[in-house]
């Protein structure tokens, strides 16, 4: 029986995730975690009966922590096995494709490399943008979470693995920053593709360097939408 779940997720997501877990096991102790320092402080020594769940978190969990968790650790990745690493939606849009998805996998020392437990694939429109695809992938991820919650919240046994494997190189923060940097001779077609893949906002803005000066695109839509828990909010 699981005694405690360490829930690594943004505060805006934690409440909904906790509700799903406690519906499956009302006696479960759930500890929200929002920082690596808090996680390290919590995981000093063996943690029997404890499971870690990371839901769309950017925090990389050290091997030393994975080794002390008695009931293992699982990551809910907002991208399919073909897109490991950071910003999967951005690189999918830039590379093109017909299907995207979300993945649940065992956490391992190497990011997005552990055995896969569940995948949800879905079709996407040809002209999908980052905001729309992020909303689609997080709705898919929540559906997988609700499906697996009865096992995760009750049984200390590992989730069964499925016949899916990771492919492609895991993308990084540096890869994303390189995508944001436009070449000085960028074509209109390339600009529009990167703009659709990167999106808008202070933390993901296109930039260009001309004549020794760096320019950053920070314009916003007239009616901006914010992504909260996989939903668009005005």
Image (cartoon, helix red, strand yellow):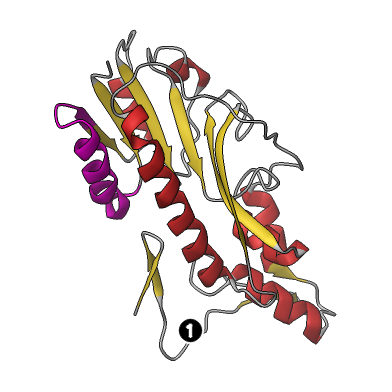
Q: Is residue 33 visible?
A: yes
Judge left or right: residue 143 versus residue 172. left
- Magenta part of the protein: which range? 10-30
Instruction: Report x, y in % for residue 41.
Output: 30, 22
Which quadrant holds residue 53? top left
Instruction: Report x, y in % for residue 212.
Output: 74, 75
Residue 103 covered by magenta stretch: no
Which quadrant holds residue 163? top right
Say which residue appears at 46% left-offset and 39% top-offset: 59
Say which residue appears at 44% left-offset and 45% top-offset: 144
**On the rendered image, what quadrant is the C terminus found in?**
bottom left
Q: Is residue 164 above or below residue 156?
A: below
Q: Is residue 17 above or below residue 89?
A: above
Farthest left residue in view: 27
Q: Is residue 177 above or below residue 227?
A: above
Say which residue appears at 31% left-offset and 52% top-offset: 13
Q: Which one is in front, 4 or 100?
A: 100
Judge left or right: residue 206 versus residue 131. right
Q: How many marks?
A: 1
Secondary element under disc 1, as helix, strand or loop, is loop
Neighbor class of circle 1 (other Cα within 10 Å; few <14, some 14-19, many 20+) is few
Q: Which residue is mark 1?
A: 220
Q: Is residue 213 visible?
A: no
Residue 15 covered by magenta stretch: yes
Instruction: Report x, y in % for residue 140.
Output: 48, 54
Judge left or right: residue 9 versus residue 182. left
Say which residue appears at 60% left-offset and 33% top-offset: 111
Q: Is residue 99 above or below residue 163?
A: below
**On the rendered image, what quadrant is the N terminus found in?**
top left
Which quadrant holds residue 12? bottom left
């Amino acid at each position: 029986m699981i005694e405690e779940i360490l829930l690594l997720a943004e505060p805006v997501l934690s409440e909904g995730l906790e509700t799903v877990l406690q519906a499956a096991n009302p006696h479960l102790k759930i500890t929200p975690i929002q920082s690596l320092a808090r996680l390290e402080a919590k995981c000093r020594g063996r943690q029997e009966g404890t499971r870690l769940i990371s839901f769309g978190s950017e925090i990389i969990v050290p091997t030393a922590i994975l080794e002390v968790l008695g009931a293992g650790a699982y990551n809910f990745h907002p991208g399919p096995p073909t897109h490991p690493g950071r910003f999967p939606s951005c690189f999918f849009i830039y590379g093109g494709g017909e299907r995207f998805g979300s993945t649940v996998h065992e956490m391992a020392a190497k990011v997005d490399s552990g055995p896969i437990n569940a995948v949800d694939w879905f079709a996407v429109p040809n002209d999908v943008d980052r905001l729309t695809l992020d909303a689609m992938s997080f709705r898919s991820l929540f559906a997988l979470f609700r499906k697996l919650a009865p096992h995760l919240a009750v049984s200390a046994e590992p989730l069964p693995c499925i016949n899916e494997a990771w492919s492609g190189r895991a993308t990084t923060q540096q890869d994303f920053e390189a995508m944001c940097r436009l070449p000085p001779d960028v074509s209109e077609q390339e600009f529009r593709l990167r703009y659709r893949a990167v999106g808008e906002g202070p933390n993901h803005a296109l930039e260009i360097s001309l004549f020794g000066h760096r320019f950053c695109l920070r314009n916003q839509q007239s009616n901006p939408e914010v992504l909260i828990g996989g939903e668009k909010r005005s």
